[in-house]
Every structure is written in C-alpha cells, then in structure tokens.
Amino acid sequence: MERTPRVASVRPAGDMRLLVTFTNGEGRTYDCRPLLERPQFRMLADPGFFRAVTVDVGGYGVSWNDDVDLSEYELWTNGEPVAGSVPLAFRRAVADTAKS
C-alpha cells in the first residue's frame, strides 16, 4: 500500500479552496466549503482566519489553530488534482534519462 505524501506547502485560493502541494510534487485543490456545515469548521467562513492556514510540523496536514485542522490523507484523498502538476518521481526519472 502506497503512503500518502505529506504536505509541502499550502496557500488559500479563491472560493474557500486550498492549493496544496505535496512532497511528491503533485498539487491538489481542496474545497473547504462543505466543511462549513460542521460546527468545528465554521470559523473558516471568516476570510482572515481562512487565510491564516499553515502546514503542520512534518507535513502531516494543515491547520488554522489547535482546533481546526485537516490531515494530509483528507487533503490528498478528497482534493482535486491540479492540471499540469507533475509527480516528483517522474521529474527525477526524466532528469536521470537526460543525464544518460
């Protein structure tokens, strides 16, 4: 079973979406709007709070504070792949081939 890649970076995008880049080089967008139905995520409706998202230590997810966070598994599994993002393993393979 393949491990879920960790989060390398995150930035808020429009329409309550997160643009997440993973350690394997792939990017995904994650729509946070459905989370607003759950009480623990209602603070995300505040634009200033939403923009304060950070990557957790070790890349195991993202968080806004100690109570509001998302795991790397959630972001990877339910995020939409970003067109044009290329997995790091593929980029390395191409670079290795070019060196030969």
Image (spheres, rainbow, N blue to C red):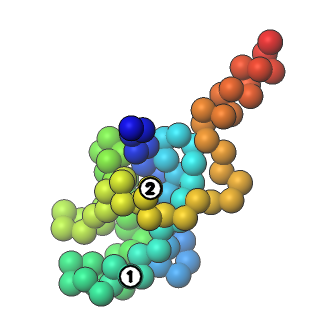
Identity of the residue drawn at 68% across and 59% down: 83
Up-down relation of residue 74 to residue 32 (above or below): above
Q: Is residue 59 left or right of residue 82?
A: left
| Residues packed near mark 2 inside 10 Å, few (<14), some (14 to 19) or many (20 plus) | many
Q: Residues within 10 Å of mark 1 (few under 14, many from 20)?
A: few
- Number of the label disc, if any, that sits on residue 8: none
Quadrant of the image containing the N terminus: top left
Measured Cα–Cα span from mark 1 to mark 2:
16 Å
Q: Label 2 sits on what residue type?
A: Trp
- Quadrant where the C terminus lies? top right
Left or right: where does residue 94 sit relative to residue 72?
right
Callout 1: SS? helix
Tell me, for residue 76, which label it has, or none.
2
Asked whether the viewer can see residue 16, the reply is yes
Q: How many marks?
A: 2
Q: Is residue 27 above or below residue 70?
A: above
- Name the image quarter holding residue 66: bottom left
Q: Position of residue 17 (x, y in %)?
A: 49, 73
Percent across and percent down for residue 29 are 53, 65
Q: Which residue is mark 1?
A: 34
In the rendered view, would you say 56 is above or below 30? Answer: above
Q: Residue furthest top?
A: 100
The percent position of residue 81, horizontal first and vertical second, equals: 58, 59
| CB within 8 Å, label 1 to label 2 | no
Mark closest to the chain's N terminus, 1 or 2? 1
Q: Amino acid at mark 1?
A: Pro
Instruction: Check disc 2 and report its element: helix, strand or loop.
Output: helix
- Residue drawn where x is 66% and y is 28% of the image: 92
Q: Give the residue drawn at x 43%, y 58%.
A: 77
